[in-house]
Amino acid sequence: MKPGVEVETPVHRELGLTDSEFDLIVEKLGREPNHTELVMFAAMWSEHCSYKSSKVHLRTLPTRGPQVLVGPGQDAGVVDLGEGMACVFKIESHSHPSAIEPFQGAATGVGGIVRDVLSMGARPVALLDPLRFGPLDDARNRFLFSGVVAGIGQYGNSIGVPTVGGEVKFAPCHGPNPTVNVMCVGLVPAERLLGRRKGGAGSALLLIGAATGRDGIGGVSVLASRTLEDDAHESRPSVQIGDPFLEKLLIEACLDLAGRGLLDGLQDLGGAGLTCAVSETAARRGLGADLDLGQVTLREPGMGPHEILTSESQERMLAVIRPENVERAREVCARWGLSARRVGTLRPGGRLSVRAGDEIVAEVPAPALADEAPAYQRLARPPRLDAIRADDPAKVPLRVPLEDAFFAVLGSPNVAGKRWTYEQYDSLVQGGTVLGPGADAAVIRLEGSVRAVAVSTDGNGRYGHLDPYLGGAHAVAEAARNVAAVGARPLAITNCLNFGNPERPEVMWAFAQTVRGIGEACAALGTPVTGGNVSFYNESGDSSIYPTPVVGMVGLLEDYRLVTRPGFSSAGLSIYLLGSTRPELGGSEFAEVVLAKVSGVPPALDLAAEARLLAFLQECARQDLLASGHDLSDGGLAVALAESAMAGGVGFTVAAPADGLAPHLALFSESASRALVTARAGREGDVEEAAASHDVPITRIGLTGGSRLEFTGLFDVGLFDAVVVYEGAIPTLMSGARVAG
Amino acid sequence: MKPKVGVVTFPGSNDDRDALRAVALMGGEPIPVWHQDRDLGGADAMILPGGFSYGDYLRTGAIARFAPAMAAVREFADVGGPVLGICNGFQILCEAGLLPGAMIRNRGLSFICRWIHVRAEDLTGDVLEVPIKHGEGQFVASPDELARIEQQRLVAFRYCAPDGSLDESFNPNGSTHAIAGLRNDRGNVLGMMPHPEHAVDPDLGPTGGQSVFQWLLTAARDRVPA
């Protein structure tokens, strides 16, 4: 430590508050805050909790639509699935904790997002985990990757929520700063949705679940709202430790309480702990609260009020319960073996008054904590990308055999099979999984109905790097395409915006552009934003992550028995390419893997064309015209064809459409708004007609059959050889062996 | 009359609702049984479901065997009542001494969720496609126990290739003698690591689990007074 510096630094700066923020707190209180109050403000006004750098931009997003039951600002978004059912969903990042302690960091990320969904009264039914790491030839990256996957698996498997999808991608910029996002989907009868309006003055606040300890103190201000520097390992005590068994009991107990009509409200304790839960619970109802810290069950003696108030101990929920129901609620919790302590009471007026023993240790207006953090219009300036954007990979002649390029792309860890990851996740528990990991979108059926919810998470960091506007728009379009590829109607999104330090103008510019791209795509595709999460400060030293928006899209499949699967199901089926292929290799997998270039501009995106493709795919599913359907994305047509062949165990013979393109452009271009389908035997005419009526370009490119992947006139490879490369890539890298060539 | 099949919910059971749903789909009457109940609700057969009872923090199944419902299940088994233990339920049956052997961590040390094939070691030799999902499913037993298991033909299922042949590369967790499921010497208690309750609905995938439920329901019917 540096004692000289220590003495001179005011406490508020140590806590991450600026001088002007301190002055604003003094203004709101009409006096200087005491230490406890200052800690509460520092937590609630942290970037992580207050979105102070991002909210001016997030306000521009489209959030309304007839399908939206609950939009942004709640614990999770909610859409209407019909038949009286609602889908609750939210995505969040846990990147900073995972960089420091991958297993617990990722595990507690799962726990937190599950409680967000639970707090709306919904049963969590699916998890998806979009992950990004540095290249696997580095031992530390392998350590982080395996730790994160094991942590997600251990937590999700133990609580009985299936992990059904996500992404795993790799880029050098994610070495120092891995990106760990987790999305949870829940289902609830719409009439039983828990809002934030019920529960008036006099209602009891019950703290349910784990005892409160010193773990995670300062998580939001220390970890999530600063960059990771060399001494990051000293932050390890700020990482929480998960107890999935307790979480499982918490899920069942809260659903039991909700089912008995005992809950007027429920909020999870996540970032900023009790301070956040109580101040938001009170502020959203236009009320205040009395909070008695003496009633909080502590894990260890001697904890100060500020520690109890900001502890991020996991597996805790705060319930709003009418006084006459408190005893029954405690009995329900006891049946599940859970402690439930009455720690406070909602009061009229807006004051949050905190008692410890005989002393009032804090008294602050609840809205000041929850809603009145400053919003910053931070300086934004485009970075210098002209040279790199001008370097178009499509103009580089191919100097390696096409077949070698094919295997290089197929075996690239970004494209290659992710079985190593998803086999560590229970994707079947709860018995609703119609389509699990490895499909375009996961599909979970509703209990007692033929309806199902389809979910996909997508984002492309290279696109975000080269053009953040297009990065945001493509993330929405691809997620929608994946949901439509299984036959579902895209309904709405949640987003996780992973960026560097927002105090740098280049990062802020990229953020603003990304949000604009997401907003325009969501408006065009009719999929409003229901909420999400912003993760800033994903940088350390001079390394920042790509601007990485990850979009989680949910959709409705009216009859899961009509689901479209990606695999070629039999021989002799006509293969169709939907959409137009242009010479677009900017930011592509091919350019990075074969040409060693992350350059050019991402593919153009015509949102009207995208919408037409989505409508076509849904209509085909409704009429049951397709034997398979798969979207085109990383690696273009070649990869989509190979994946469909491998998934079904059936080869193909295809003539790549000429369109005047060089073969490598036809095969590896990542032009947007395209899909690969096979028609059911005898329905070819109907498929072609549907494409024409939706004004979607359609080309019959070949036939399924055999055990080879045959690109007529170019090259052909064995299906088995493709499987070896595709499935073997990640296990081989994880075994630590270097891949030859 | 439909046979009643009880499914015990322990704290941390995850596949209890799935087992109840499978019982109904296969023509039984599902009866939820709470771990603190000594009364099995008049069940004609019992299922101990999958999950992580008590978090499995000590040793899989080690605490669940002390639950009041387990005393009732033991009495039920002692008089010949059919009992099926799935995954964590199998581990609990081993801990309770109702089946021999024990499960340790998978050979590869990772949790595995995968569709696999098992061969029924009865006269049929049927090959069933069913999923596994466990971190601690490697069956082990002392040499004496193992000899007795084989001698008395207690092995119910072995991991196998899709064609039914035994091949160590199709043994996902390193189980001794590729053992995936066991029965007791009386034949009324069956434990298995694969999840038959996730393989009964043709709308969702393969239906290799149906024959396991058929066995359970047939045994239950035999107990229902005509």
Image (cartoon, coloured by chain):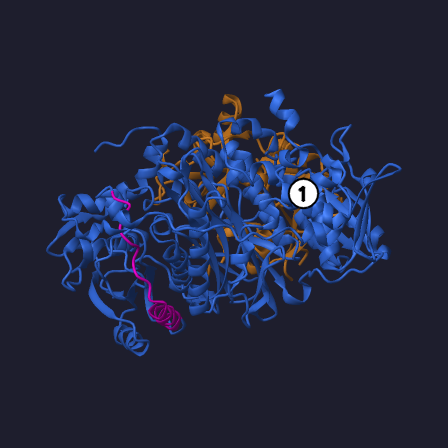
Query: Image quadrant for the C terminus of chain A?
Result: top left
Image location of residue A440, percent across then percent down: 39, 56
Image location of residue B185, percent across then percent down: 57, 35
- Is residue A369 shown left or right of residue A535? right
Residue at (70, 33) in percent of width and height: A213
The tint chain B carries is orange
Number of on-image labels: 1
Q: Callout 1: 10 Å neighbours few (<14), some, many (20+)?
A: some
Magenta highlight on residue A312? no
- Is residue A468 shown left or right of residue B58? left
The magenta span reads A597-621
Residue at (52, 38) in percent of width and height: A96
Query: Image quadrant for the N terminus of chain A?
Result: top right
Q: Is residue A689 above or below residue B45?
A: below
The tint chain A carries is blue
Residue A422 visible, this angle: yes
Q: In this view, does B104 lie above or below B82?
A: above
Residue that numbered label 1 is attached to:
A22
Residue nearest the observer in this picture, A348 or A108: A348
Image location of residue A209, percent across then percent down: 72, 42
- The quarter holding residue A473 reads bottom left
Q: What element carries label 1?
A: helix
Residue A652 visible, this angle: no
